[in-house]
Amino acid sequence: MHMSTLLHNISTYLPETVLTNEALGIEFNVPADQIFKSVGIKKRHISKEGELASDIGIQAVEHLLKARNLEKKDIDFLLFCSVCFDYAAPATSCVLQDKIGLTKHIGCLDLTHGCSGFVYGLAMAKSFIAGGLAKNILFITSDTLTKTIPKTNLELRSIFSDGASATLITEANYKSIGEFVFGTDGSGAEDVYISRSGFRNPADPEFLKQEHLLNGKFEMDGMKVFNFGLKIVPQLIQDILDKNSTTFNEIDLFVFHQPSRFLLDVLRKKINIPEDKFFINIEEHGNTSSTSIPLALSDAEKQGKLKPGMTVLLAGFGVGYSWAGTIIKV
Amino acid sequence: MDILEFSKKLEGEFEDIEKDSVSPDTVFRNIPGWSSMHALIIIAFIDLNFDVILNSADLKEAKTVTDLYHLATKKSV
């Protein structure tokens, strides 16, 4: 029973190459401690050239299968959450069915969300199991945002990072996932986005060459995104508590998407969350997009801050704008 | 919070700044080492103390610390 809890069915994978403040400092002729002061991040994980989100997603799955001694044949649905797909079509989850070696008798679905993506995936997995569509769902989050950032952009390179997670949601653990709250404001679509990455204003070879990019360019209006977080997150937290008929004090740990150290600190103060109940690990990893929450859960467990039986509030918010939250019993 | 307390507390939010270098008349963009991070610090400070979220247009409109104070107090009423 212990091994079937949600927390024990999460694995993560971080690319080996690390970008430190010292390395960024040399490249941009800026003191390393100044970079740390402005973003509160020590290092970021950088995927290799030619190593895609699907590739690092497979690594996370391999870790999970190994750690949990799982049989691939028991997985009957695959969800892949990313903003860095192999193709516009087919779905990358279809490509992954074959590469991971899953049975052909499974459903596959891609989910295009960043910061709110992990919570979205949990919601879909829970409803699929509750609705009888599947029994054992493999849910991957994976992004390689560092491939979308121009080399010359210090601000974005100092914040964003690559990483993947794999979570198994099963008939044995889906009931530990609570009720969900969702929110969307598409008017902010271009406040944080990968420009020239789709059919609208597609990238041409000259543009990509000029910016040293693969496909599309990450752009962010930092102030607008910061204000978005300040505006929606406090209400999101209240809505999650209300929807789950849970009081603030019943939450053992608050695990948010990790967008920036400063925003997290301000949100914690604004919502009056005690420091020991608010998990922050952005310092060690940077912003890993859809992988930030499972990575935080995994780190919190390793640090002894998260133990089986705890009640944890999850909140994802960002690109879209999109936000989502729930409560889980780990 | 009156304007003097506002000015003092805002100074406390900025690291690496000399004591008494922020006053109600200070043009905040002229604060030594001014960066976009300072703008976020101002937004966070006003939100946490007045429950008012200034946007970039508000900040553009303001020149001095007193202007920020007026924006914060006017909007929070």
Image (cartoon, helix red, strand yellow):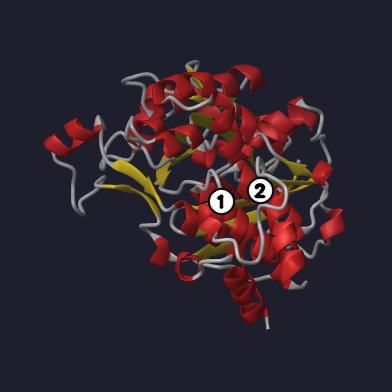
Which residue is at a point 74% across and 33% down the rendered structure image? Answer: A300
Q: From the top left corner, tell me how far across and down residue B77 is, in percent.
A: 68, 83
Left or right, residue B54 beside residue B7? left
Left or right, residue A51 beside residue A73? left
Which residue, given by chain and number where applicable, does mark 1 sit on?
A: B31
* For the residues bearing labels 1 and 2, Cβ distance under 8 angstroms: yes
Tag 2 secondary structure? loop
Q: From the top left corner, tell me how far across and down residue A293 is, in percent.
A: 61, 40
The label number, if any, that marks residue B14 in the structure image: 2
- Going by the numbered disc 2, the residue's amino acid type is Phe
Q: Nearer the viewer, residue A86 or B31?
A: B31
Q: Chain of mark 2?
A: B
Which residue is at a point 79% across and 65% down the rendered structure image? Answer: A245
Which residue is at a point 52% across and 48% down the rendered structure image? Answer: B34
Tag 1 secondary structure? loop
Q: How far is mark 1 from mark 2, CA to CA? A: 10 Å
Q: Nearer the viewer, residue A256 or A191?
A: A191
Asked whether residue A134 is in view, the answer is yes
Which corner quadrant holds the C terminus of chain A?
A: top right
Mark 1 or mark 2, whichever is nearer to me: 1
Which residue is at a point 74% across and 36% down the rendered structure image? Answer: A5
Q: How many marks?
A: 2
- Going by the numbered disc 1, the residue's amino acid type is Ile
Q: Nearer the viewer, residue B14 or A151?
A: B14
Left or right, residue A30 beside residue A329? left
